[in-house]
Amino acid sequence: MTGTSSTGMTRRALLGAFAATAVAAAPTYSNAAGFLRGGGDIRRIKMYSGRTGERIDMIYWIEGNYIKEAVQELNYFMRDWRTDGVKTIDLRTVDIMAAAHNLLDAPDPYMLLSGYRSPKTNAMLRARSGGVAKNSLHMQGKAADLRLATRSVNQIARAAISCRSGGVGRYSGSNFVHMDCGVVRNWGG
């Protein structure tokens, strides 16, 4: 996927070096609403998957444009790990996730519990738990279930709710927060 230049540096390494520079030079964001409206120069997402062991820490948006390669990597990272099914992730959800993370000023990455879910996976989870929606936005690539080691479910949910950009569910018993780009609403405790 990435080629090596005559200097021995891969395109990915070059983008990483640029991203590190951009992060160091980026302004801080005082609120999520401004961030979601393009109030900053970059958008960054940090996540890891306990299921696959994969990690991402990337700039996926610069100066009003999504970075195609980063978006493709996000789609793959947020795949249904049970079936290896990949779907285009709605970037509005990623924007909400990034804005909430920024508001929390958390040093650690999100742990992604669930991103895209195939209909087969969703049906299996629904059979195990009453908390899984039949027509879950996960199946459309519009939702993510997340946790942060250094923040509580309530802290994460409050940050996501303050974005006023989609659905936010608190699942305190399971220690995660659901974020989606659907109707603005919140639930759970």
Image (spheres, rainbow, N blue to C red):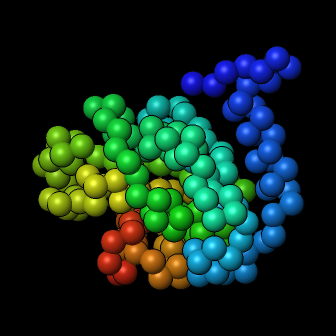
Name the spot of residue 74 as percent of width and height, x first: 50, 45
Name the spot of residue 53 as percent of width and height, x first: 53, 32
Name the spot of residue 50 as percent of width and height, x first: 49, 38
Question: Is 159 on the left or on the right of 57, as rendered?
Answer: left
**Which of these two is toward me, 85 or 120?**
85
**Which quarter of the figure is the N terminus placed in?**
top right
| Quarter assignment of residue 6 | top right
Tell me which residue sits at (53%, 64%) in the image. 95
Tell me which residue sits at (63%, 73%) in the image. 38
Question: Is 179 on the left or on the right of 85, as rendered?
Answer: right
| Quarter assignment of residue 9 | top right
Tell me which residue sits at (54%, 34%) in the image. 54
**Which quarter of the figure is the C terminus placed in?**
bottom left
Question: Is 41 on the left or on the right of 6, as rendered?
Answer: left
One can see residue 111 in this view: yes
Tell me which residue sits at (66%, 47%) in the image. 58
**Which of these two is toward me, 187 or 189?**
187
Is residue 103 shown above or below 60? Answer: below
One can see residue 109 in this view: no
